[in-house]
Amino acid sequence: MLSLEQLRNNHYGSTIWVLGSGPSLNFLSPDFFQDKITVSTNYSADSLGFISDYAFSHYHHVSWDLLDKSKVVVTLAKDTVTQQDWLKPDVDNLALAEQINYKPPGSNWNPLTSHNPGRETLAYGSSSLHGSMHLAAWLGAAHIVLVGADCGTLDGEHRVAGYPDGHKLWELYNEHHKLMKTFLESEYGVTVYSLNPFINFNLEGHNFEGV
């Protein structure tokens, strides 16, 4: 098993692309990511049809399933739902992130204050995307580009095709994504942007509904 420390600054100064599960991914080709360093949130890269460099999940059963769908998988030492320690066999491409000063995330989650993960572990947020974003900074990213962090529906679709159904707490996630961006900018000095797969904010006639 890998240690989280072994991954620190492995891609120092790079641009790292972090995939959420939003429907804007449906308008991208997996070939687009062929020459890019990627971090997948849960099944995002697999749903799009490529093997990511890294994947992050809060859930141990998902992390176990991702081991052959990503080069390296990072998960929390304790499963989000069961609160159990990692019970699966040790594997060479898995790293565990310890929860320090653990507090379950909720509507009051704030990585700048009450849920500050410090520099020794990764954020445990209301969405697995927060851990993926933090992992990118941990890997040494100078620039993080979010892909599919949509916080809404596009033409009525709320996930990339093939992704499991999930929560749709767009307003909550939108606020927490902004907090996570601020934390990473202040703590790691990274820039955080988001990819629009269309030519401009008119979305080429597609209909977005969000917060």
Image: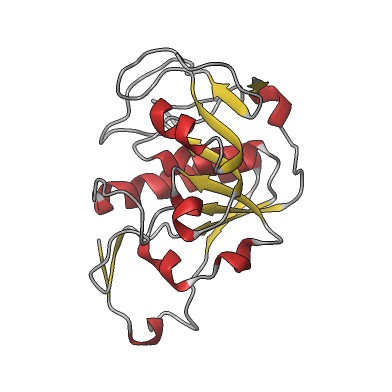
Q: Residue at x 40, y 17 (%)?
A: 102
Q: Residue at x 40, y 28 (%)?
A: 61
Looking at the rendered image, the quarter that the N terminus falls into is top right
Q: Nearer the viewer, residue 69 or 120?
A: 69
Looking at the rendered image, the quarter that the C terminus falls into is bottom left
Q: Nearer the viewer, residue 166 or 46?
A: 46
Q: Residue at x 50, y 38 (%)?
A: 66
Left or right, 62 with reference to 189 = left
Whether residue 18 is situated above or below residue 122 in the rendered picture: below
Q: Nearer the viewer, residue 52 or 176?
A: 52
- Can see residue 111? no
Provide residue 129's location: percent of width, then percent of height: 44, 44
Q: Residue at x 55, y 35 (%)?
A: 67
Scheme by which the image is coloured: secondary structure
Whether residue 77 is situated above or below residue 134 in the rendered picture: above
Provide residue 186's location: percent of width, then percent of height: 58, 41
Q: Nearer the viewer, residue 8 or 81?
A: 81
